[in-house]
Structure formats: structure tokens, C-alpha cells
Image (cartoon, grey):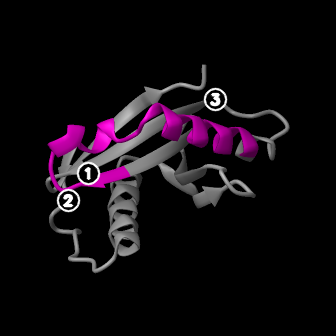
């Protein structure tokens, strides 16, 4: 599913501001698709840990760990391709740490929201923990 991001895109001065704008657009998009926000910017303690941009809950109760990536264009592979195996491992580590809070963890999946050239693409089940 593709969504035009131009209306929410701002000319942010810093990388952090651009990242926050991308996360806001992704959050708005996912909420419009029926997901509920559980937590934002969950980080594992210590150096070298992972971060999960958005943790969402689907109507069926599944937890969805979302990585948001934004790029101006498809140069160098684009937004989705920038979620490398190293980044995936860090997200998986953070998700495992987050799930320690749950006695009986619900079903989970890892999604990517790729924002590129003004469009949003939601890639469900982009990678797995296996």
C-alpha cells in the first residue's frame, strides 16, 4: 500500500527532526490502517543495543515492531533496502528485550515503513527473528 507523504513532510533542519517527521507520518498512516500505538522509540539499555521506532498492536492482539526508514529517492537501494541484517538483528534484540515484560508474549512480527520520494510503503513481515 502506498500513501503520499508530501502533505506531512516538513523541511526539517536536522536529521533528528527529519526522522521524527518520518515517524509521525508512519504513525499516522498505521493508525489510519487500524493499528494502535503501544510505545514509541523503545530502546534497550546500554551501548550497542537496539531501538524500535514504533510498537503497534493489531486488532487481533499481535504486536508489530516497526522500523521507519525515509530516503529522498531510490538511490543506493532506497529506504527499504537500508534495513540491513545488522539493523534487523538490533531490532530483534530490542524486541526480545521488550517481550520480557510479557508473561505470555502475543504473536509478533517485524514490519518496515519505507518513505521514499514522498510516498509511504508499508512492508508487513519484512523480516523474521528466525
Residue 81 position, x and y percent, is: 31, 36
The residue mark sitting in front, 1 or 3, is 1
Alpha carbons under labels 3 and 2: distance apart: 30 Å
Quadrant of the image occupied by residue 70: bottom left
The tag on residue 5 is 2
Q: Seen from this angle, which residue lies furthest bottom?
A: 13
Q: Residues within 10 Å of mark 2 (few under 14, many from 20)?
A: some
**Residue at disc 1, secondary structure:** strand
**Residue at disc 2, secondary structure:** loop
Identify the residue under disc 3.
Answer: 107
Q: Is residue 128 above or below residue 90?
A: above
**Residues at discs 1 and 2 in contact (Cβ within 8 Å):** yes
Q: Earlier in the sequence, mark 1 or mark 3?
A: 3
**Residue at disc 3, secondary structure:** loop
Q: Seen from this angle, which residue lies furthest top?
A: 130
Quadrant of the image occupied by residue 17: bottom left
Name the one closer to the observer, 73 or 123: 73
* Residue at figure coordinates x 60%, y 26% from the top left: 129
Residue 125 position, x and y percent, is: 44, 28
Identify the residue under disc 1.
Answer: 115
Q: Quadrant of the N terminus?
A: top left
Query: Which segment is the magenta one?
Result: 69-97
Residue 42 position, x and y percent, is: 62, 57
Can the viewer see residue 54?
A: yes
Name the one closer to the observer, 17 or 112: 17
Q: Is residue 27 above or below residue 79?
A: below
Q: Earlier in the sequence, mark 3 or mark 2?
A: 2
Most common secondary structure along the magenta stretch = helix
Amino acid at each position: 500500500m502506498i500513501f503520499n507523504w508530501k502533505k506531512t513532510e516538513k523541511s526539517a533542519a536536522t536529521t533528528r527532526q527529519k526522522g521524527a517527521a518520518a515517524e509521525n507520518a508512519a504513525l499516522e498512516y498505521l493508525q489510519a490502517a487500524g493499528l494502535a500505538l503501544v510505545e514509541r522509540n523503545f530502546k534497550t539499555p546500554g551501548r550497542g543495543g537496539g531501538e524500535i521506532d514504533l510498537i503497534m498492536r493489531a486488532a487481533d492482539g499481535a504486536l508489530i515492531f516497526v522500523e521507519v526508514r525515509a530516503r529522498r529517492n531510490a538511490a543506493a537501494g532506497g529506504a527499504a533496502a537500508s534495513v540491513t541484517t545488522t539493523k534487523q538483528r538490533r531490532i530483534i534484540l530490542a524486541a526480545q528485550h521488550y517481550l520480557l515484560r510479557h508473561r505470555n508474549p502475543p504473536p509478533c512480527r517485524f514490519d518496515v515503513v519505507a518513505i521514499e520520494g514522498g510516498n509511504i510503503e508499508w512492508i508487513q513481515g519484512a523480516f523474521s527473528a528466525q
